[in-house]
Image (spheres, rainbow, N blue to C red):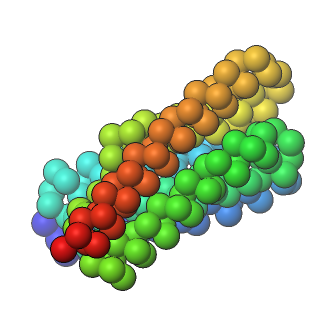
Amino acid sequence: MSTLFRHVPNLLTGLRLVSAPAVAILLFDGNDRAALGIFALAGLSDAADGFLAKRFGFATRFGRYLDPAADKLLMLASFVTLSIMHEAPLWLTGLVVGRDLAIVLGVIAVVTFELPIAIKPLYVGKVSTACQIVYILLALILRSAELAWPSVLNAIALLTAFATMLSWSGYGLLLVRALATRIRS
């Protein structure tokens, strides 16, 4: 394989980083279909870069940090923009942003205090992220189609909130256990 091909996963992740502000700008400009298209392409690029990195052994240390950062930025931009536009409840956006901020602070604590935790996503964290993606995707589809299904969107918001709280609790419990282990030793 060419050495240039080895960088395709990181290139796709970089494009996903750029897609976050693009989605926000397109939404603010009223280009809902374009925002939906960019969001969908960002999701496909996430799947593609993960597949290429694993299948061909192209995973890099840089990519391991860049990939989740790109995901978080896309979710952050999407939730905040939709909340500003009164399309997503502020309480849900606060919960999603709070969880991600807590995870980042937790990682900083793990590294700073050399806590005995492997930094990797939990299954409940993946479920939470999947619920968040479904919520954003549905909100963008409804905007693009000029439909209003508040009961469906509200139900998915509650499911997303529940999954996000479970995830937050799961990561928090890991951190508390690691701190307790460190204090005991």
46 vs 161, left or right, is left
Horizontal side of 35 relative to 101 (left or right) equals right
Horizontally, residue 27 falls left or right of residue 67, namely right
- Residue shown at 58% from the left, 27% from the top: 159
Q: Is residue 172 visible?
A: yes
Q: Quadrant of the N terminus?
A: bottom left
The one nearer the camera, 111 or 83, is: 111
Return the x and y of residue 25 as percentages of the image width and height.
Answer: 77, 59
At 70% from the left and 48% from the top, the residue drawn is 93
Task: Estimate the x, y position of residue 44 in percent, counting from the top left.
Answer: 44, 44
Q: From the viewer's perspective, is residue 153 above or below residue 27?
A: above
User: Quick one: quadrant of the C terminus?
Assistant: bottom left
Furthest-bottom residue in this view: 112
The residue positioned 68% from the left and 63% from the top of the image is 21
In the rendered image, the vertical position of residue 86 relative to residue 94, given as above or below? above
Choose between 84 and 108: the one closer to the eye: 108
